[in-house]
Image: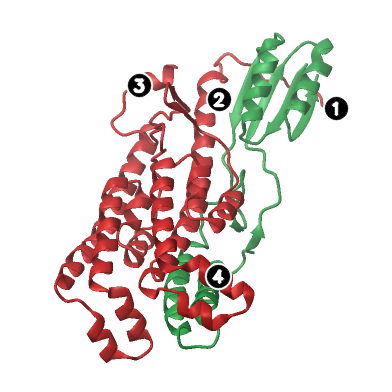
Chain colours: A green, B red
Amino acid sequence: MQIIATYEHSKYLELGITELQQNGITDIFAVPIKKVMKNPAIMDTIHHSDGRSFLDFGFLLAVVFSTILACRGLVWEWGPIYWGLIGGAGGVILGFLIEIVKFKIKNKDKKVKIKSKDKFAEVILIINCEKEKMDLVTDILTRNLVLGLAMLE
Amino acid sequence: MKQLKKSKRLPRNYLGLIDTPMLHFRNPYIVAGWSVTFPGFGHLILGKYFRGFALIIWEGFINQYSKVNMAMVYSFNGDISAAKDILNIRLLLLYMPVYFFAIWDSYRTTVDLNNEFKLSERDKSPLRKYTMNSFGINYLDKRSPNIATLWALFIPSLGQTYQHRTLSGLFTLIWAIVYTYNSHLIEAIVYLILGDINQSTQVLDMQWALFIPSFYFFTIFDAYVNTVELNKIFDKEQKDYLINNFQPSNYKIKKGRLVK
């Protein structure tokens, strides 16, 4: 019996493997997979980051704009705090748009998503075990947040 | 652990009890840009904490002494003569060399560290996962960049503390409190909430308040970026662990049929 399972990198992966070992299933092979990114996402999440940052420039602009607008705000009606915050938010958004436009010019065919929702199998586990233990293995892996499972015979 | 024993010249991360300095690719222009907004921030991004602290403390002192912030306020509002009047020129010229040094040095160091990172990646330097002794514990963990950003939005420094980067967290917290206290920011915000904009503007001390935008946005940026990078280090460490322990050379993959 061979079970193939896919995982994201997380503590649960190690917890799953060690629990399998405790139950006497030690014939395990692990293949970490390199991610191939097609469409970049603006926001990185716990499991996902594409090494492309759309935010860096925006935060620099935020500092510049909020400083200048806070100064001008002393004279303007809404005061320095509101104008400082407006400048900050405006800077982030403007920097954002500039980065996205730059990216779009370079890569015309690619889409930019706000957040990547798809879960990606970052590790493939291959587990050899006897047929009777199949349910146990499935149970352990499922409790430890496995993404996908396949059984071969 | 076997992998830790391999002696390498430069590790990819150092898991200390109070902080986790690490190497990863950084854009030299962005780092230099942070040094432009506040000398020392570029060095904090790179993990050169004490060089950064020294520059930040110097900037706080010289700016306060020479009233550079007030001069900026007047200049942006077109009142050049008031700007000239408020500047204290006794130490003013000392401001420039350190300011430009900070920008140049952070740029140069980023390029250098990027090269060192390339070397240590090719070298497959080992990564540390746990540090524990009687003073505490630190370990690689997966954290949400959005949660880090959210905490950083409330008070500068909480984002860093969330990542267990206590040294930069504590330092930014102390300065955030000093600036907030002296600029009367909270009072100004309370007046704003009560709807009294004039009173709010009057109570604000702009010389101190002008430090706040750079500090505020820097800590948010730093919290976000470093959470992502710490997560990547976690992934790398786990990958190394799996490759070292779960790839026996005699393993056979069956050519069976899919049952379920």
Quadrant of the image for the N terminus of chain B? top left
Q: Which of marks 4 and 1 is in front?
A: 4
Residue B213: give x, y in percent of width and height.
44, 67
Chain identity of mark 2: B
Same subunit: marks 3 and 4: yes
| Residue at disc 4, secondary structure | helix
Residue B23: give x, y in percent of width and height.
38, 43
Of pointers 2 and 3, the one earlier in the residue sequence: 3
Q: Do the residues labelled 4 and 1 touch (CB within 8 Å)?
A: no
Q: How much space separates mark 1 and mark 2, taking CA atoms?
A: 26 Å
Q: Nearer the viewer, mark 4 or mark 2?
A: 4
Residue plotted at (61% across, 55% down): A38
Residue plotted at (43% across, 62% down): B181
Chain identity of mark 3: B
Q: Which of marks 1 and 2 is in front?
A: 2
For mark 3, does the 10 Å Cα neighbourhood hold few (<14), some (14 to 19), or many (20 or more) residues? few
The image's mark for residue B189 is 4
Residue type at mark 1 is: Lys
Chain identity of mark 4: B
Residue type at mark 2 is: Leu
| Residue under pointer 3 | B6
Of pointers 4 and 1, the one earlier in the residue sequence: 4
| Residue under pointer 1 | B260
Q: How much space separates mark 4 and mark 2, taking CA atoms?
A: 52 Å
Residue A83 visible in image: no
Quadrant of the image for the C terminus of chain B? top right
- Furthest-top residue in this view: A24
| Residue under pointer 2 | B242
Observer-nearest residue: B203 or A65? B203
Residue plotted at (25% across, 81% down): B86
| Residue at disc 3, secondary structure | loop
